[in-house]
Amino acid sequence: MRAETPRLVRWGEHLARVLVGGGRLLVAGNGGSAAEAQHLTSELVGKMRDDRMALSAIALSAESSSVTAIGNDYGYERVFARQVEAHGRPGDVLILLSTSGRSPNLLCAAETARERGVTSWALTGALPNPLAMRCDDVLAVPADSATVQELHLVSVHLLCAQIDAALAPAR
């Protein structure tokens, strides 16, 4: 994970600029990764440590009515892509979390992000995987699923800390 610190710093600084500039963060995952997506967005809309402005971050898996309606009408593989179509604007950021990097609904979301000019980043398990190949950048953890999810949580906290540091007033 120490080797990934520069990536998380870069991501945090980029996200801080996007969010302060009126852009938004979209985040998606399945199962435990969906919980991590909600955790990330709650830290940004609320706060992780110090008080600061609310930031626009949406966990796409938390939109249960949208997920079930889209799944019913368009198929489960489109549940996140359709929301990227609705909410994603050029310059926004989409973070996709997956231990395997093979979930069809995340692959479809990454493709939609590219079509829409939305920057896409993946937090995945070991490389190679199809999601990593479809995103603009990837933080890949070569470990078993439980360890991947644990390190994704660490990554989420480091990313939020970097965003907060980038937004902190100069001392």
Image (cartoon, rainbow, N blue to C red):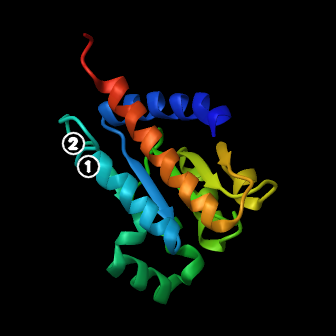
Q: Position of residue 30 (x, y in %)?
A: 53, 72
**Front position in the image: 106 or 158:** 158
* Residue type beneath disc 2: Ala
Which secondary structure lies at badge 1? helix
On screen, residue 126 above or below 157 = below
**Residue located beneath label 2 in the image:** 54
**Front position in the image: 150 or 167:** 150
Q: Position of residue 158 (x, y in %)?
A: 46, 39
N-term mark: 1 or 2 = 1
Q: Position of residue 116 (x, y in %)?
A: 54, 50
Per the model, the C-alpha gap separating discs 1 and 2 is 5 Å
Which secondary structure lies at badge 2? loop
Picture residue at 57% right of the left edge, 61% below the top: 149
**Front position in the image: 151 or 64:** 151
- Which of the labelled discs sits on residue 31, or is there none? none
Picture residue at 47% right of the left edge, 30% below the top: 14
Picture residue at 35% right of the left edge, 26% below the top: 165
Picture residue at 69% right of the left edge, 63% below the top: 101
Mark 1 residue crowding within 10 angstroms, few (<14) / some (14–19) / many (20+): some
On screen, residue 68 above or below 167 = below
Assign the N terminus to one quadrant of the image. top right
Which residue in the rendered view is the most extreme toward the bottom? 72
Assign the C terminus to one quadrant of the image. top left
Tell me if 167 is positioned left or right of 118 in this view. left
Q: Position of residue 159 (x, y in %)?
A: 46, 39
- Which of the labelled discs sits on residue 45, or is there none? 1
Corner quadrant of residue 148? bottom right
Q: Are marks 1 and 2 in contact (CB under 8 Å)?
A: yes
* Residue type beneath disc 1: Val
